[in-house]
Image (spheres, rainbow, N blue to C red):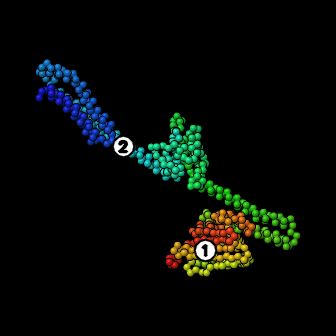
Amino acid sequence: MKTEQKIWIALAAAGCVGALVAMIAVATSMPTGIPIVAALIICASIIGNLVVLFKHADRLQKIASALSVGSQVRMTAAYPPDSLLKEIGTASQRFMDETNEKVKTLQNENTDISLQLQLTQRRKNSIEAILNSIRDAVMVTDDRDRIILANAAAETLFGFEFDPLQPLVTEEAVSSDELVAAISKCRTSKTAHVRHELTFEKDEQPITYDTVLSCVEDDKGNVLQVVAVLHDITREKEISQMKNDFVSHVSHELKTPLASINAYAEMLVDGEAEDAETVQQFCGVIQGQAQRLSRLIEDILNISRIESGLVKVSKKTHSLALVIRDSVEMITSYAQEKSITVHSPASILYDQVTIDRDMISQVVINLLSNAVKYTPANGEITVRTDLNEIEGQITVMITDTGVGIPAEDVDHVFDKFYRVKANNKYAKGTGLGLNLVKQIVETVHGGSVFVTSTTGEGSTFGFVLPLLKETATQTV
């Protein structure tokens, strides 16, 4: 083979070897998914070979001239082929070493980038998990009032499905015009924090939210995003209203007996009671109102202790039939004054319950006393018990033939201070007796209360208590 052919073959081989080494390095050493980096390395290899060619362009030109005029001897003497090949080989080796070094550098950089991407993804997942775990509804809108972030609570509240790739327009996704207007106003006014109390309809029930809107600005003061956090305060509002109602009712109930006591005491002081009979009458009114006041305060304290968990409970195993029997005996004389007949149940063999006897006695007496109050003369009151061995519970029912309760009042008779207006003329009271019954049965003993009534025909009040577990097992 001629010397010039060897030279050109060596040049071409050097270039191919350099490109091949680069491609092999990319294919075997670099991670997948970065074709741009591979292309850059290949281009660098080709450019390196071109540099080598340009570097020896003058020599190659002289070689070509020498070959064209037949001066092979002079060319060989001036540019020995072995020397030229060696120099080209050295340059190629140097280029391959540089290429390998660059590949290693890129590998290290790519590893760092991969770690950073993994860390960023973990942080993103952690933030999403935190947002979705928050019970408050959280929503973020951009400078065009589009929803770019929302947690699960916000999706449930407004009934949309958030997709980060397809931002929703706030006006279309949020059903509350008031909230949409508040977000837009917060963005345009650049107010740092705004607080609103908004009410939405959910399952046909009004729900109140304490809504806080905050602006996110860049270093130039431009509003980039608006963050809305909605906290459900419906229960807090209800409790606040209940407290206000409680104070109002207590004040009213306390003022009535106190006014009577004060009035009759003043008449006694002014000497308006001219004889012993009048004095006794005035003192009797004062005593009766003082007792009413005492009962009211005692009921309020008992309910408060039960609700706060501070009541002292002494639970023991008792026969419920015996507790009912004793309570009926206590109320019989009161019922006989109105010629009302009380029918009590026969004893049940296995009716053992774990109760605070005094509290359950108070429950039965309260229900019997209400039945007597609202039953006309010559009426009847029937006490029945029903033992459910399968469910392991016993039910006590007190049925009267009284005036009954209007349908619209039935669901509220166990509320604090609630009195049926239609029945006020039959008896006076504080409206706390039935609520105390409910607290004792449900809160203290884990049972339940119920009532059914028909106006003009009578009512049935009752409660359910769990049987003693060993007794329930024995009866089954």
Distance of label 2 from label 1 (alpha carbons): 71 Å
Outermost residue on the right side: it is 274
The image quadrant that residue 94 belongs to is: top left
Q: Residue at x 22, y 33 (%)?
A: 16
The image quadrant that residue 259 belongs to is: bottom right
Foreground residue among 217 and 372: 372
Residue 99 placed where, x, y %? Answer: 27, 35
Disc 2 target residue? 114
Residue 270 visible (yes or no): yes
Q: Amino acid at mark 1?
A: Val
The image quadrant that residue 270 belongs to is: bottom right
Q: Amino acid at mark 2?
A: Ser
Q: Residue at x 28, y 34 (%)?
A: 42
Q: Residue at x 50, y 47 (%)?
A: 150
Disc 1 target residue? 396
Check disc 1 and report its element: helix, strand or loop.
strand
